[in-house]
Structure formats: structure tokens, C-alpha cells
Image (cartoon, rainbow, N blue to C red):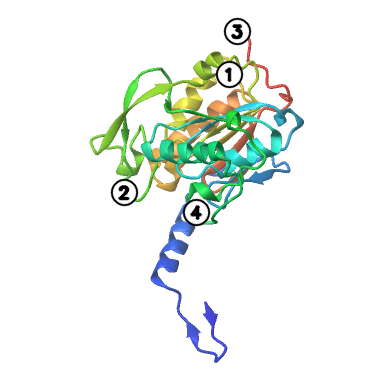
Amino acid sequence: MKFSRAGSLRVPSIALLKKAVHKFRRALHQPRVSISRVQTLRLGSAYGGWDFIDREELHGSTVISCGLGEDASFDVEFAAKYGAKVIILDPTPRAIAHYQAIVDRMARGELVPTTGEPWHPGRYDLTNIKPSQLLLIPKALWVEETSLKFFAPSDPKHVSHSIIDFQNNYQMTGTHIQVSTITVEMICRDYSLTTLPLLKLDIEGAEVDVLKHMVLGKVRPSQILVEFDELTHPSKRSNTRFFQAHEALLNAGYQLRYRRGANYLYEQPGSSNSVMKTA
């Protein structure tokens, strides 16, 4: 608690108290895991930013970034810093509209930020990237190519939909849209990617199934940036699912390098060239 200059007690607002309690509960329920820490770099906004390992192989690379929402700050800054192509996946209508607004800005030559307002497509600095560096696939990442229900969040103000509907206690009966899905291997095949130095997953619970499926195949990204979204709704089920994915990655040779809240960074040591696993 803080005191005013006159010495009177300044009482925190209800909103601040709720935020502090929520943050404490999330920290209390964080799984206990071993982390082999390394130096990391962070790009993106306070909300949409990610921590990763700065490597030479990222320059001029092609990476896959799943889950755009209405914050493309990481994708834009990554593309600008490394001269990289970022393949973005998100079938959510508001995410598609946000991406299109960015592309339209570049087409009009409006590259300098026009506002600092969060979620606004005019806040990105586009002076150091080309339209070809940001590519959107309006599909959801999953374990197979199919069509699935994509469930809306419980709060209509939020943008992120979920295949597993964890935001609504896994009911799978609420408001939804129908979306097409694709796998990591299919993306690598379609874009002739023989290396994948970085994969980012912010896919609202589907990351557990995707990672478990991916390590059984041939794709081995050097770095995996993943938000285990279910950990933001602590439960026995969410913890169990987290450890399923975590142990699958460890068994595939990955090491946990960094953690910030529900965001985790895994690396395959010695995989600087990020070649795909051979059969």
C-alpha cells in the first residue's frame, strides 16, 4: 500500500486488487519445472511480445507464427529486425481484419506509426519491412487437415477463439465459427521449408495436442515459443495437459530455456541449422 504526501493511506482500487489477486493465483499454480536459462531477447509489445534466443540463423529466415489476434507487434518487429518472412496463422475474423489493415497501410505507403493506441493497426512501424514479409494463412493450427468448431471466448471483448474451448470449461457447446485447419508439416511442405528456426504458438489450448503430434513427425524447430493458455485457468486438467506437452518436448531433445507467466521458450541444443528430422 502507498501513502499520500499528507500521510493518509491510499487505498488501491478494486480493479487493481483483482488484478493483483489474479496474478498471484497464476504464479501460485505455475508448474514446477527445471529451466536451463540462457540470455534472451524480447520483441513486441508488453501484451504481445515474446522472448527468444537471438541467433544468426534468424536473419533472412522464414518462421511460423500461430495466433495473431489484434497484436502483430512481435511479427512486425521480428520481420524488420531479421529481414525475415513471417508466416502467420489465424482464422479469427477480427485477426484477419487486423492483418488486412496492416497490409492496406503498406499498400498506401503509410509506413510511419500514426497512433500509439493498443490494438490499433496504425501503431506499427512498417518502415523496414515489405508486404511479402508478412503472410497470413487464415486457418487454425491442428493435428490434421480438417474443419473444426472454433469456440468464442466467454468475454465478447476478447478476440481469441479456441478449438478445445478451455475458456468455457471445455464445454464445446457454445458460440463458435467453423474453420479449416492445417498442420506444421503441411505448412513446411507447402512453402518448401527445409529449416524452421522458430515456431511461435499462441493457439488457445491447442498447443498441447499440436506439440505432442509434431514431435512424432519430422519437424524440429530450433526454438519453440509457446503460451500454455490453459495455465491461465489453473486446474488439475490444465496442469496434466501442460506436463503432457512439456515431457513430449523433453523426450524429443528440447530444453526449457525461459518462462514468463504462461509463455515458455524451448530450444533444441546444437540445432543451429534447424534441419528437419530425417525418417
Q: Dot 4: few (<14), some (14–19), or many (≥20) neighbours within 10 Å?
A: few
> Which label was assigned to residue 170?
none
Mark 3 and mark 2 in contact? Answer it, CB < 8 Å.
Answer: no
Identify the residue position indicated by label 3 in the image: 279
Of circles 3 and 2, the one toward us is 2
Identify the residue position indicated by label 2 in the image: 156
Q: Distance between the residues labelled 1 and 2?
A: 35 Å
Up-down: is 8 above or below 49?
below
Identify the residue position indicated by label 4 in the image: 118
Mark 4 vs 1, N-terminal side: 4
Along the viewing direction, whichever of 141 and 99 lies nearer the viewer: 99
Mark 1 vs 2, N-terminal side: 2
Q: How far apart are marks 4 and 1 (CA)?
A: 34 Å
Q: Distance between the residues labelled 2 and 4?
A: 18 Å
Mark 3 vs 4, N-terminal side: 4
Mark 2 vs 4, N-terminal side: 4
Q: How far apart are marks 3 and 2 (CA)?
A: 45 Å
Along the viewing direction, whichever of 62 and 20 lies nearer the viewer: 62
> Which label was assigned to residue 219?
1
